[in-house]
Amino acid sequence: MTELIIKNGFVFDPLNGINGEKMDICVKDGKIVKTVNEHRAKKIDATGLTIMPGGVDIHTHIAGGEVNTGRMVRPEDHVKDAVAKTAITRSGTGYSIPSTFVTGYRYSRMGYTTVMNPSMAPLEAKHTHEELNDIPLLDKATFPLIGDWWFVLEYLQKGDFEGCARHVAWMLDTTKGYAIKIVNPGGLESWGFGRNVHSIDDQIPNFCITPRDIMVGLAKVNKMLNLPHTIHLHTNNLGLPGNYQTTLDTMQALEAVPNDGKPNMHITHLQFSSFGGDGWGNMKSAAPEISKYINNHSHITADMGQVIFTDTTTMTADGPFEYTLYSLSGHKWVNSDVETETSGGIIPFHYKKNNAVNTIQWSIALELALMIEDPYKILMTTDHPNGGPFASYPKIIAWLISNKARMATLKRCNKKGQKKSLLPTLNRELSLYELAIVTRAGQAKALGLKNKGHLGVGADADVAIYNVNPETTDIANKYKTVRKAFRDAAYTIKDGKIVVKDGKVVMNVDGKTMWLDVETQQKCEVDQDMRQKFKQYWTIEYDNYPVYDHYVKVPEVIPIKASV
Amino acid sequence: MITLTPLKQFKYPIHAECITPETFQGKTASEIAKLPLNEGNKPKQLGDLFKIEESAAEAPNIIINGDVSEVRHIGQGMKTGEIVVNGNAGMHLGEKMAGGKITVNGDVGGWAGSAMKKGLIEIHGNASDYLASPYRGISEGMKGGKIIVDGNVGSDSGCYLRGGLIKIKGNAGPFLGYHISDGIIYVEKNAASRLGANMVGGKIVVSGVADELLPSFTVDAVKPKVKIDDTESAQGPFYVFLGDLAENGTGKLFISKANNPQIGPIYGKYL
């Protein structure tokens, strides 16, 4: 089959310890190999270019019920960003919530090849997979929302972790999911009754457990099932001033789960969980407290949740938080209660430079990224589209690698916000090696993707080539060059095929959808009791519920052997 | 001055963002004839559809003689100068306009003066729906400037108004002033149902009959007159209503007392 050789590029492959060495990358049949037949292979001359593994995004809302509802309530988002079809690509629209095809093209032109859809109400699983099937050029996976699922709450209430583990394994198979997503544990169930939880030890209505029990319980379940990723956690009290204390409590609570020096939790969009102060008036950054804790502990990974100053759409399963945003903005608001499973909310939001709170939010994410010393622990995301559209990643890259870029933006921000920003005290500038960690290697490692995020022999041939010469370019000074290079990849290679050249999609291929087939010693029985509950509490019959295998267009099943 | 005359009765919608004083500025008639526009889905040039004549007179900058009710986006985003349309004009006339003046001696289509910021639009005929309202889904409406309509307006006019003045000498359709937060809408005749729904600020003045009042408004006072702008006041007396309480709004509805005898028996006791 096809062979490819990428010659003479500067390779940044952190998982294999390669830092800017000049070397050749050989590809055969969609995998990285040691050598290829140089005469037969197609050649890419990468002299003076930077080569990295294809980008990986651990947290980006690109498909599913709430994304699609977001599209429906935002016609103005489509009017301002219409994309015409070309001979290869299809047309589409959408700035903060692009249509499925445009999502694939835009990610791919930035050199991304793998993305994770982190929030799927199990009831919306079929819809989510239909959309994922339509997103081209990317490998995808999706995380079902399990934290407030009634059966799980019942198992945890009984203290039956093994039963819970079997049930979660069944859930992952039923929804074709990849990891356990927990959003505002307990809060979503409370929202069904118009309430919320305000600390990790509040009791959840109608269940004799607390958010702490859910998080610790599911982290234990995650370990029993040997899942590749950790629990993927959106903390309680997200987006409220002073919530860093809850975040610290949460991280301390998870110390109870033995971790052998490996992470057992991933806190997503950490910026939204790192607010100090006790009201919007004196809200400040709690990045020093949070980063100090994370620097001293090994059981956490996190991602940034960077805010971009732009008009975007927030969407999350955290219904009560969206209500808070609605009270603040009065903007059009979607609120949904997904039966016994979760909740959801959508609100358009404009992050403005002249707003003190937005400036501090922008600053917090960068402070976290710079103050947390190990780049494997803090990964680059915007929590697309909550902090800003993913197409803004090149901007974040510029801020991370260049103090000059950060100061250029900061000086145009709100004066009060500027005073509260800690960025002027931080001189750290990420190298291309560290950048490769926060945008691909670290993300793949945190997700437990063995064949992604590196260029070692046997890895998937997902490669990004950027027009940056690390020998001659002072990246911190020439951040605009780097920003441009990361916006339009010189080449993106997906499964050994050149799909993007000079920022233009030149070939259309389907990406795979990864899901976990977890084998437990004893299977979870779909018994009469469960069917009865579906009859009583769901709007659809059990038999119409699961995502059957044929639903996934290009599946990649990852078999997992659980220890229960 | 440039005079445009349609060469035929247009059958398909024409998207003519190019018809603004700024685009025409400093161009000869033959250059203007080459400006691109779309007829339906076919790319065309201005000269294919219009006869273009140049004359020495200074103002107005552009005159359009004839029925251009299929021609959309005339004067979109214009900042200075003047356009006169002698005939009916199409949708999106003066959309996002930021200065200058447009006069229409005829009727206009929907979204005239949509989300405009500054300038003056005079319509000596009727206006269709969505006068001054932003395009669907957008919540930032007209911010400033003035729109004067001699005839009637359709539904959903003045939505999301944030400033400026809309003066309607005829009747207004339903949902007039939906969700406005500032600015003034003055209707000299009658206003249809759902008047001022969801308004959070601003003023709506109705000198004629108000078809129906939403229950989420509360009566506050009776005032003899209302100031419309520096030169004009509307003569009352007017009932003053506050709302929309469903949005915790502080907008004011001024409803003529003389023309709305149905209000007295219901609200009079609360005054």
Image (cartoon, rainbow, N blue to C red):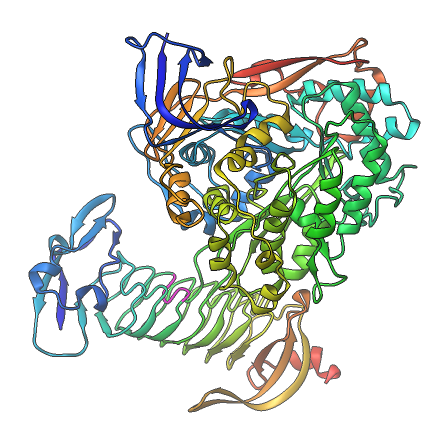
Q: Quadrant of the N terminus of chain B?
A: bottom left
Picture quadrant where residue B98 is located: bottom left
Relative placement, left or right, of A159 versus A262 is right
Residue at 46% from the left image edge and 22% from the top image edge: A462
| Closest to the observer, A501 or A139 | A501
Is A82 colored magenta in this rendering?
A: no
For the C terminus of chain B, the quadrant is bottom right
Is residue B165 shown to the viewer in this render?
Answer: yes
Main secondary structure along the magenta-highlighted residues: loop
From where the camera sits, is residue A151 visible? no
A224 lies left or right of B233: right
Q: Residue at x 79, y 48 (%)?
A: A246
Left or right: A532, with B109 as reference point: right
Q: Position of residue A146 (x, y in %)?
A: 74, 30
Quadrant hosting residue A153: top right
Q: Which residues are magenta?
A: B111-115
